[in-house]
Structures are given as structure tokens and as C-alpha cells.
Image: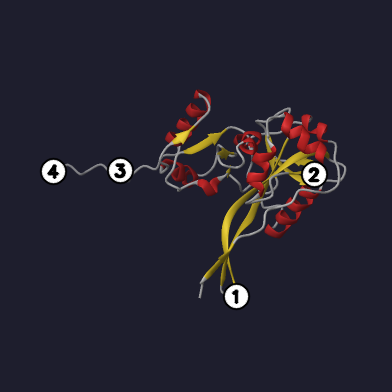
Amino acid sequence: MRDAKRKRPAFAEAGRSHDFRQFQAGTYQTGENRTSHTAFASASDLMQEAFASVRNVRQAHLDYLRALGVSPGALACLGQVQPPFGVLGVQELEGSLFEPSPVGRPALIVPVAKPITRDIQGLSIDDIAIVDLIAVRSAEPTRWLWRDGSAWALGSGLLGQNAPLRVVPTPFDWLKAGGQALCILDWAAPAHCWELLRGELALELPDGQLRNRLRNALVRNAALPPMEVAPRAA
């Protein structure tokens, strides 16, 4: 019987150092150019890699993010529900994917998480599942790589809360918002993803360019009712 509910602890940020300045180098592609593929990492792999990246974070990385406009408060807010970010050396793969590499160039790693509930000995425990990892660099904030390729957005757990939903353009903006926003990663996502957005109370966007892009995506992926030509009366 589920008569109790317990929350997870906040996630820590500590570990070995990487040169955060190297985040400014590299080329990435958005989801519109991403090709189909098979999964490269299991759920347990993703969780292990997420926490490995978090252990690489040092004060220099936090200072650099702060200079980019990501406040300690925003990271602390996000850290209450998931690992906020990490640092990994990454090797780019075909299809806008990446894999961790000890000789790869460092990149900012943003875990894509979804809320789940686990039933452990009668306790209903709030938890998360890491469904993908995003690698991005500050020099090209609108271009990123996927670890697995299955994530269509950061912050999808905010959908369906019957409140205005803030939409931001990049993972860096999502970190600035403390995770309290939606960042669309894959603009070529299946239609059912866009159907979730069509049911929102209101969408708040920072500029007309993102609004127009989102409107076009919603129209392009709108579900149409069955249509048939009625037979003519004899």
C-alpha cells in the first residue's frame, strides 16, 4: 500500500577538472540534420555517464557559466530535481551523436531527464530517468549533439501542468531558467511530441523568431481528422 512518499536528495556537483574554455570550440548539428540510428547507450550507461560528467565539474566551470548568465541559484534550482550539468571529453559520431572519449574535446553535458515514480517496499519515491545526454559548447549554443538520440526536448516534464509554459531556444537558456522551461532539441520530432504542446494553456517565448518557428512546427505536425469524399446521391 502506498501510504508514504519520499523525495530524492539534491544532486551534488564535484570532481575532476577539465578546461572549460574549450567549450568554445567545435561544430555541432541540430536535430533537423540528424539521421536515424540505433541506441548507443543503455539507460544505466546514460545515468553513469551523467554522474561521471558531474564529477568533472570544478569551480572554474561554475564561474564560466556564471559569466554566461547562468546563476548559481538557477543551477541550485535545477539540482533539486536532476544533475544540472557536467563536463566530458566527447567524440563526434555520424548523425549528430557523440560518445565519451578521454581524448575528445571537452563539452558541456546537459542530462535530459523525465520524472518517474518508483515503488520501493510500499514507499512511492519520486525519481528521474536519464533518457539522453546533450553535448554543447558556448561558441555555438544553437548546435548540439545527442548521446542516444531519443530526446526531443529539455523540460518535457513541465508539459500538462495547466500553466503558461516558457519556451527557450538553447540548452544554455534552459540552464539560465533553472530548468523551469522547455527547450526543443529536435525540430524534426514525431507528430505526437507536438500534440503535447498543442494542449498547453499558453506558450511564452522570448522573441518572434522562435515563436514563428514553433508555430510553423505545430502547423506542420497538426493531426488531421479522417477525410473522405462522400458518394454522390443517385
* Quadrant holding the C terminus: top left
Nearer the N terminus, badge 4 or badge 3? 3
Circle 3 sits in a helix, a strand or a loop, which is it?
loop
> For the point 77% across and 46% down, which residue is it?
99
The three-letter code of the residue at mark 4 reads Ala
Give the image quarter of residue 32: top right
Q: Mark number for residue 57?
A: 2
> For the point 71% across and 33% down, which residue is it?
28
Can you tell which of label 4 and label 1 is closer to the viewer?
1
- Check disc 3 and report the residue beneath it: 227
Against 14, residue 21 (above or below) is: above
Alpha carbons under labels 2 and 3: distance apart: 55 Å
The three-letter code of the residue at mark 3 reads Met
- Check disc 1 and report the residue beneath it: 121
- Check disc 4 and report the residue beneath it: 233
Nearer the N terminus, badge 2 or badge 1? 2
Alpha carbons under labels 2 and 4: distance apart: 73 Å
